[in-house]
């Protein structure tokens, strides 16, 4: 049978209905520093570009700070020999428009302070303020600030302005020797960071206040403090198939509900450190290699007065540097204000040998059998469960095989009166061949059961019931491939 991954996505009402796409080329404008093309500077070409144009830049040294305000593709001839140098001031490339593609450049020598009319928090080699931006196949090096900055906060006329970004992709870049983080982002949604080589930065990848972020197939080496840090609460962070070596801490998780698997983590003071409030969703850490780490894993749980729900992290099938025939104890601590005391979590079935981490493998290839991932913005007792907006929840079915596959998805809602699940609705879909998680294929929406009698265990959101517990099953040719369920904590509903 073919592998099928089911993901329930949360699509906020404010998000566009389109997925990521590169703008259609209407016209090509040529730039060459030697004067033999349409323009000698990239900014001159940008100033006359229209929506959908392509700006093609021949090899050369371009000392300028460019600002992109229209949806265009800016393409360099050869990334090693097409160089944009910021001269030590401002962002080297500043992207304000949606649907921009940037590829084929060496981008270097940014500043740290901004001098173009308003005060920003941060400066980078590439600073992104648009949605559905595709930054790929560049060398981003030796910037005084950040390598790539997906920024959303500015101060203008004394007021802070905040944007949330969605649908950006950072792929196949070499990000070396930047003064701050290789990649920094916050308040980003549906972001993919994949197949990048990130070395010798202050931090490899830093993120916060974001959702549906995939960090996969990256190499992170010798980045000072941390390989990957979730500095403030994020949701639906998935970290898989990365190679992380020679940092103080490979991965820090400060929220809950993250999934970390198939990573090779080597030569660290601490491999993974998790920190969360007791009622937040647990992190799921499985099928990773921990090699020559002084402390392979460590966790902290925080309790506050009146909150006594507990969700332990899930550790499964990790390789802990040695062949083990018994469960692995993961040491940490519980903080119950004002006290702190030692605590232990357990990997019940540690791996007996290290995994072969393939950086080019797809998400489906990393897992065996069928997998149903039902996650979302309702905080649950173990993992986030259902993605929804005010009226619907959404189903995206993905197929890694070579032929279309028909499946049946059944949804059940917990009935408090009968103390059992009651069938709610089913959906039959044909999942297109070779559809993968970031393409949002086969979206099906179901309306919340607005008249459902769920008091006192349900929650209402603009007149609609949000169930206390839900379950989904996936069937193929009459066989149930997988089932997942979760109960939601009363009182901790977060949109």
Image: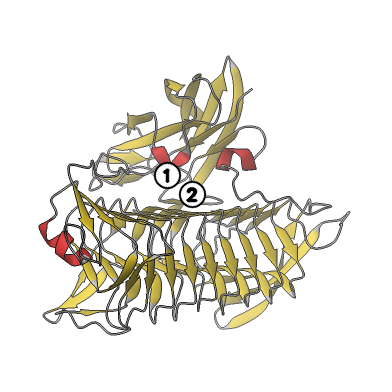
Viewed as shown, does residue 442 lie left or right of 364? left
Image height of 483 relative to 15, above or below: above
Question: Could you say whether the residue bearing mark 2 is in a helix, strand or loop?
Answer: loop
Within the image, what quadrant is residue 97 found in?
bottom left
C-alpha distance separating marks 2 and 1: 18 Å
Q: Are marks 2 and 1 in contact (CB under 8 Å)?
A: no
- What residue is rendered at 62% in x and 39% in y? 365
Instruction: Report the front residue among 37 and 203.
Output: 37
Q: Quadrant of the N terminus?
A: top right
Instruction: Report the front residue among 345 and 39.
Output: 39
Where does residue 8 sit, x and y in percent of width and height?
A: 43, 39
Residue topped by disc 2: 384
Where does residue 101 sit, x and y in percent of width and height?
A: 30, 53
Viewed as shown, does residue 294 lie left or right of 234? right
Comparing labels 2 and 1, the label whose residue is closer to the camera: 2
Within the image, what quadrant is residue 133 found in?
bottom left
Neighbours of disc 2 within 10 Å: few (<14), some (14-19), many (20+): many
Total labels: the figure holds 2
- What residue is rendered at 24% in x and 73% in y? 65
Where does residue 337 sit, x and y in percent of width and height?
A: 54, 80
Which of the two labelled residues, at mark 2 and mark 1, occupies the earlier sequence position?
A: 2
Within the image, what quadrant is residue 343 found in?
bottom right
Residue topped by disc 1: 457
Question: Could you say whether the residue bearing mark 1 is in a helix, strand or loop?
Answer: loop
Viewed as shown, does residue 74 lie left or right of 183? left
Where does residue 303 sit, x and y in percent of width and height?
A: 54, 71
Instruction: Report the front residue among 247 and 51.
Output: 51
């Amino acid at each position: 049978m073919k592998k099928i991954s089911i993901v329930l996505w949360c699509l906020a009402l404010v998000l566009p209905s389109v997925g990521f796409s590169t703008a259609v080329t209407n016209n090509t404008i040529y730039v060459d520093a030697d004067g033999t093309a349409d323009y000698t500077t990239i900014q001159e070409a940008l100033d006359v570009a229209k929506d959908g144009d392509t700006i093609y830049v021949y090899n050369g040294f371009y000392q300028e700070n460019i600002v992109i305000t229209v949806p265009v593709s800016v393409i360099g001839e050869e990334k090693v020999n097409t160089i944009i140098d910021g001269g030590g001031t401002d962002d080297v490339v500043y992207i304000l428009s949606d649907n921009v593609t940037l590829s084929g450049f060496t981008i270097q020598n940014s500043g740290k302070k901004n001098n173009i009319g308003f005060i920003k928090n941060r400066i980078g080699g590439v600073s992104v303020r648009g949605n559905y931006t595709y930054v790929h196949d560049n060398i981003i090096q030796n910037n005084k600030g950040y390598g790539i900055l997906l920024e959303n906060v500015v101060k203008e006329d004394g007021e802070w302005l905040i944007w949330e970004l969605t649908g950006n992709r950072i792929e196949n870049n070499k990000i070396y020797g930047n003064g701050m983080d290789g990649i920094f982002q916050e308040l980003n949604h549906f972001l993919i960071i994949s197949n990048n080589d990130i070395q010798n930065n202050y931090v490899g990848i830093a993120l916060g206040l974001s959702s549906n972020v995939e960090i996969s197939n990256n190499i992170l080496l010798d980045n000072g403090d941390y390989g990957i840090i979730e500095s403030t609460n994020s949701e639906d962070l998935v970290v898989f198939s990365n190679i992380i070596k020679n940092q103080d801490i490979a991965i820090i998780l400060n929220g809950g509900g993250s999934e970390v698997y198939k990573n090779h983590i080597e030569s660290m003071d601490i491999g993974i450190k998790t920190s969360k409030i007791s009622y937040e969703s647990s992190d799921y850490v499985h099928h990773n290699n921990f090699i020559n780490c002084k402390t392979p894993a460590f966790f902290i749980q925080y309790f506050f007065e009146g909150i006594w729900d507990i969700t332990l992290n899930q550790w499964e099938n990790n390789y802990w540097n040695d062949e083990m025939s018994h469960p692995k104890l993961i040491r940490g601590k519980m903080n119950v204000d004002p006290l702190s005391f030692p605590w232990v979590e357990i990997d019940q079935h540690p791996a007996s040998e290290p995994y072969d981490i393939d950086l080019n493998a797809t998400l489906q290839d990393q897992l065996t059998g069928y997998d149903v991932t039902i996650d979302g913005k309702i905080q649950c007792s173990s993992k986030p469960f259902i993605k929804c907006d005010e009226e619907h929840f959404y189903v995206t079915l993905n197929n890694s095989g070579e032929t279309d596959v028909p499946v049946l998805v059944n949804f059940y809602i917990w009935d408090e009166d009968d103390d059992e699940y009651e069938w709610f609705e089913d959906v039959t879909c044909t999942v297109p061949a070779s559809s993968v998680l970031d393409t949002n294929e086969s979206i099906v929406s179901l309306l919340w059961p607005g008249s459902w009698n769920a008091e006192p265990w349900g929650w209402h959101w603009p007149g609609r019931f949000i169930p206390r517990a839900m379950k989904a099953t996936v069937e193929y040719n009459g066989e149930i491939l997988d089932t997942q369920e979760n109960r939601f904590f009363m009182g901790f509903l977060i949109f």
